[in-house]
Every structure is written in C-alpha cells, then in structure tokens.
Amino acid sequence: MQSSSRRWAPRKYGERAELVADLRFSWELSGSGWATCRVADGSAERKDVVSYCTDALADLLDGVADLYAPGTVHRFSFDLEPAEIRWVLRGLGRDVDIEIYRFPDMSASFDAPDDHGALVWSSRQDRGALSHAVVEAAQSVLRLHGEEGYRAKWVLHPFPLAALQDLRRLHLRYDGCDIPHDMPLP
C-alpha cells in the first residue's frame, strides 16, 4: 500500500504546490458499514472514517481513473455522517494536485464551492504513484475480504471490481508501471 512519488506540504487554497516524495494510501474496512481511509506523504497524513452511505471505494477508484480522461478537475465525496470529505483532483499533465476539504454537514455542503470547506490536506503527486497506491489498497481489501466478505462488511454496496479493473488497466497502459499487480486484467 505504499508508493513513492514526489510531494509537498499542505498549502492555502489557491497556492501552487512543489513536488516531493513518499505517497502512502490505505483503505481498511473498520466495522459494519465503516472504512478507514488514510493518505500520507512526506510531511502530512490525513485519516477519515468513511460511512457506507455512499459507494466510497468505487467513487475513489472512479475519481482517480477520471484523471486519464480529458478534463482537468475531478471531484468525489465521502460521507462521514454528518460531515463531508471532498477530494478534488486537478490533473496537470502526468502530475495531479490533490486537495481534501472538510465540510461540517454533507446535506448542506454537497453543492457548495470547494473553498467553502476547510482545506485539511493537499499534495502534488505523480498520477502513476497515486493510481498505483489506490490500486494496491483496493486489491489488498479484496484479498483480505473477498467480494462476499466485503459486501457483508460494507453492507449497501458490492466490491467495486469493475472500477478496480478499469483503474488498474489505465494505470498499466498509460503509466508504464513496472511493479507487478497480483490480479489479472480482464
């Protein structure tokens, strides 16, 4: 679940980032309908306990996969009951600015502009490093729980196998990753 990349320290909204190393990401089912999401780099870490009210792991996989399509800004949110954690990914060629915002109430903030939330973590990373870290974390969840075990713990949503396969395929095709992935491509 660890991947090296370049990274920078948290910044104020609108400031530009510098690349620095050491991206780490994990996703762990932590109870019935709850997951712990951790993202860290060389200088800061963010941890959130995410609710099953949204299909959070699928949203994460789809959001990172969107970095391979045209368009430069991609957003997805996690429900923390009641707070919202919003990830904003800004593609910059092969790099991506990652900004995570926290809003106190998802029911009131879902359509709010990003800067109405508190910027709680940010980093600039290589797209391949981000994709690799997310793929590895999702594969780890699948290895540990299997599809049936995931559904039993996550309750409302099945394991997002198609989203994982899509991101893995894009990552291998466009990022030239030399690290073996333990699941065959479809």
Image (cartoon, rainbow, N blue to C red):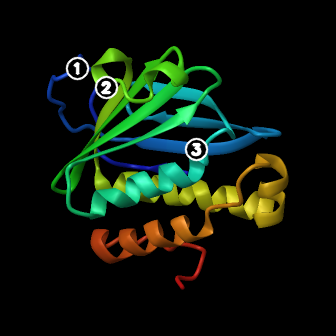
What is the spatial separation of the Cα atoms under label 3 and label 2, in whole angstroms? Answer: 24 Å
Give the number of the disc on residue 108.
Answer: none
Q: Is mark 3 on a helix, strand or loop?
A: strand
Q: Which amino acid does label 3 sit on?
A: Ser
Task: List x then y, in percent, for residue 173.
Answer: 33, 77
Give the number of the disc on residue 13.
Answer: 1
Task: List x then y, in percent, for residue 151.
Answer: 79, 56
Q: Horizontally, is 60 left or right of 5 in the view?
A: right
Residue occupying image coordinates x 54% and y 35%: 78
Q: Horizontally, is 29 left or right of 55 in the view?
A: right
What is the spatial separation of the Cα atoms under label 1 and label 2, in whole angstroms? Answer: 9 Å
Q: What residue type is labelled 2?
A: Asp
What is the spatial separation of the Cα atoms under label 1 and label 3, in whole angstroms? Answer: 25 Å
Residue occupying image coordinates x 83% and y 58%: 149
Camera-near label (1 vs 2) is 2
Q: Horizontally, is 152 left or right of 137 in the view?
A: right
Give the number of the disc on residue 26.
Answer: 3
Foreground: 118 or 146?
A: 118
Q: Horizontally, is 3 left or right of 173 in the view?
A: right
Earlier sequence position, callout 1 versus callout 2: 1
Task: List x then y, in percent, for residue 111.
Answer: 38, 29
The reply to whether callout 1 and callout 2 are in contact (CB within 8 Å) is yes
| Quadrant showing the C terminus | bottom right
Q: What residue type is labelled 1?
A: Tyr
| Observer able to see residue 10 | no
